[in-house]
Amino acid sequence: MYQPLTVFVGLRYLRAKRRNHFISFISLISMAGIALGVMTLITVLSVMNGFERELRERILGMISHATIQGYDGEFSDWQGVLEKANAHPEVLGAAPYVEQETMLRGRRTAGALVRGIDPALEPSVSEVHELMRIGDIEDLQPGQWGVLLGSGLASRLGVGPGDPVTIFAPEIRATPAGVVPQVRRFTVTGIFEAGVHEYDTALAVIHYQDGQRLFRLGENIGGVRLKLDDMMRARWVALELSDQLPGIYQVRDWTQQHANFFRAVQTEKTVMFIILSLIIAVAAFNIISTLVMVVTDKQGDIAILKTMGMGPRRIMGIFMVQGSLIGVIGTLVGVILGIILALNVESVVAGLEALFSVEFLSAEIYYISDLPSELRMSDVVRFGALALVLSFLSTIYPAWRASRTEPVEALRHE
């Protein structure tokens, strides 16, 4: 009358309305545990994806997707490289640069990376022009010896717009008074803030022609920076371009320049996934305990079903259906709640901050005042599948135990 019988009986046992309401309560707790685990996994990993995206965009706002450098650190035929790069269908922009690590002195002294750029071409490869708090990159004019400082570096040097800053070149020169370092006084024409500590506290930007004179490069530059339409192909496009050039060149892409950082972020996401998966594992153990209690409570029913001809496999099917339904319902609820929370986490956090009058993310400390979130459907599918698999596996032992019930022993005390 009721087909399939295993599904009908499993659903009836899941409700457990006849005698033991406590089992129904434990079933609800198991569903809630799985839903909470899946929702937490989706939300936390979405927030970590958002942080990774935000930091990646901020880092790429200061560096290029790829760079081509001369093997000995100097690049002579760079105009031809710019032409070939701009002719490549995957290259959106190319610009020359020079770089040296050196010392700067304002009211105080600090070490920094001095980068020379072409203000006309730099917007095609980076977002420095969008990160300016004071001034503009167009203020960098060759021969005027202007410098743009990161906000943290300006604070370390104790200088502001209009103040002089002395830059020491890593070369020395001989004079009648002895050997002295090569120095040049620059004027602060602007301050930028990228939101990345590495650049805000240790980067100074000058015009590349001033850099050529300061570092005695002649007409050479340090290399060419590239921006591509697909940053994931940065290394292959840069290698393709370097193969077309005469001589030997070094090629670096954005993942190599910050390999340790992105590797650390990926490790954190993996560890977080493992830790939060334990919530689902605990909920799966609740399913085991629930089914064990159901099996104990239904010993008489199992014995009667066996005497009526139901085989061990169908007995196992009843309890596997019951446990699997707990997992399926909990997973569906968790996925729905997780997607809703991940898509609205910024609003939820803002509401909590207003409700409790606290600030979870201070812009002065984290540079990010909002909680970013990036929901990826691949994560949703992965976490949902994990919950379903653990729920299914948790049903095997109690169902097997039910199939081993002996009718005589079970009915002895009925």
Image (cartoon, helix red, strand yellow):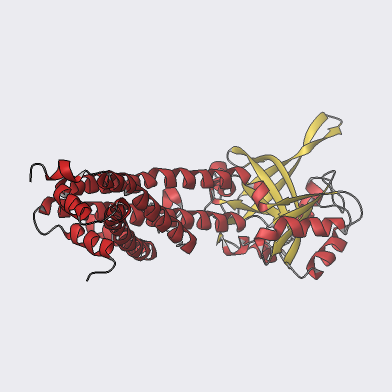
| Residue at image point 56% right, 55% down | 56
Say which of 292 and 366 sits in front. Answer: 292
Q: Position of residue 371 (x, y in %)?
A: 40, 57
Q: How many marks?
A: 0
Q: Position of residue 8 (x, y in %)?
A: 23, 64
Say which of 412 and 393 sits in front. Answer: 412
| Residue at image point 81% right, 70% down | 87
Q: Is residue 251 left or right of residue 34?
A: right
From this viewpoint, is residue 318 visible? yes
Position of 92 relative to 208 (above/below) = below
Q: Is residue 231 left or right of residue 405?
A: right
Say which of 215 and 38 sits in front. Answer: 38
Q: Where is residue 45, by image quadrant?
A: bottom left
| Residue at image point 27% right, 49% down | 287
Looking at the image, the residue that sits furthest to the top is: 178
From this viewpoint, is residue 207 visible? no
Image quadrant holding the N terminus, namely bottom left
| Residue at image point 86% right, 32% down | 174
Q: Position of residue 39 (x, y in %)?
A: 34, 57
Q: Where is residue 343, by image quadrant?
A: bottom left
Q: Position of residue 22 (x, y in %)?
A: 12, 50
Q: Is residue 259 left or right of residue 142?
A: left
